Amino acid sequence: MALLDITGVYKTYTDNNRSITVLEDISFSVEPGEFVCLVGPSGSGKSTLLRMIAGLDQATRGSILYGGRPVTEATDHIAVVFQSFALLPWLTVSGNVELGLEARGVPKQERQQRANRFIDKVGLDGFEEAYPRELSGGMKQRVGIARALTVEPELLLMDEPFSALDALTAQNLREEVLTLWRDETLPVDSVVMVTHGIEEAVLMADRILVMSARPGRIKADVPVDLPRPRNPKDEAFSRFTDRIYSLVL
Amino acid sequence: MDIVPLPRAGIGTVIGLMEILDDAGGKDDVFRLVKELQMELDDILPVIEAGKLMGFLQVTDGDLVLTGVGRTLLRSDINQRKDLLWDQLLKIKVFQEVVEILKSRQRLSVRRDVFVDLFEEKMSDEDAAQLLKTMVDWGRYAELIGYDPEEEVIYLDTEE
């Protein structure tokens, strides 16, 4: 069974007798172990789709099934990493990472232990008592990632997680996210990532879903058959990137 | 105390630059890199300087080159990287001086102001504050030193 099954999904906003369809007839599935990227122009509804998968928004029509069951609200099995980090400035790194567990009523000692495991995994050991204002963008996003991992999701959703970072920090974090995804000691099985970076998608994804401009439709579903680890300097990588660019345009 | 400002660059940017170099076979022309990354020279130079100071990069005839220990870092997991950085930071004069001072204190800790005042004897107030900020950033990552923002205290990180 597919981990995630999306069938005939539409999203329409209605206001004062005017309606705008931002997503049209979206259908795809995500298998266990897959890293899928959604690419497309701004306004193609990629982030809206991600929010619906996370249970933070509802489809106007169609179905979104996780493990065969409809997604109607936020669930333990799915966690989200945001572009803007979304950290609470009055909490330390530890406090931010533990937040999801605290909201679920997990006792303090247990949530500290669980949080510390993922603080270690993302390289934040040493920063536990730091506040977000003391951190670089890259460190803030590591907190976002650790916070998402601490609830031990099977599916990790990432909404342009590197676009608020400089090119070098983004490069570093991309590699670390791939390492975390491949880490068999972590529960994360699959990743769905929204990006406007074609090279980033080719570097990271098993499959790339190319979306059209609004209303967003899936124009192409492209398996990335390049062997890992991938090198952007390779000829095959460049050719594949060109192919995706041509599908986007 | 013989100290100079550290380059203003985070660990993530240094490792990111090293990974890009690694993709290019461990060596690349600096100005070609600047163009490819669409960065300003002022933005990339501190990263290069930080990488050199940490011993992970060297510059030879306009080419940026990964050192042996730099290559080792890239092949290591996160905790091994921290251990490597710990070793490299202890080769940097200002870290040596700060660690000596911390070790000399009973609680292995010193108020932040004490270090800032010491640094201000050698540089501007702004540079002194920035130096401490960079030291805390690198030191925390390496788990060499810690900083308690509530008490504003720098301490030696002795946790295993």
Image (cartoon, coloured by chain):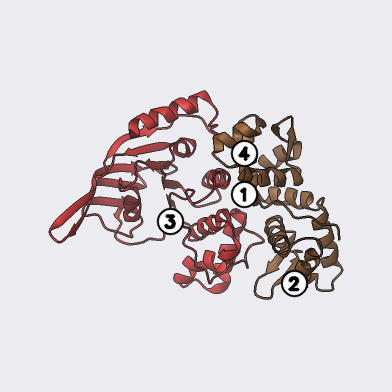
Chain colours: A red, B brown
- Residue nearest the viewer, comparing A138 with A105: A138
Q: CA distance from mark 3 to mark 4?
A: 26 Å
Residue holding disc 3:
A80
A87 sits to left or right of A44: right
How far separated are the C-alphas under marks 1 and 2?
A: 27 Å
Residue type indicated by callout 3:
Val
**Which residue has dot 4 on it?**
B19
Residues at discs 3 and 4 both on one chain: no
In the depicted structure, whether residue A119 falls above or below residue B67: below
Q: Is residue A103 above or below residue A228?
A: below
User: Are dots 2 and 3 on a single chain?
Assistant: no
Q: Chain of mark 3?
A: A
Q: Give the left or right position of residue B24, taking residue A35 as reference.
A: right
Question: Residue B113, labelled with which disc?
Answer: 2
What is the distance, in whole Å, between disc 2 and disc 3 at their CAs?
39 Å
Chain ID for label 4? B
Q: Return the x and y of residue A190 as percentages of the image width and height.
A: 44, 46
Q: Are marks 3 and 1 on the same chain?
A: no
**What type is the residue that disc 4 sits on?**
Glu
Chain bearing tag 2 is: B
Q: At x 21% / y 50%, what residue is drawn?
A: A21
Q: Nearer the viewer, mark 3 or mark 4?
A: 4
Q: Position of residue B22 (x, y in %)?
A: 64, 34
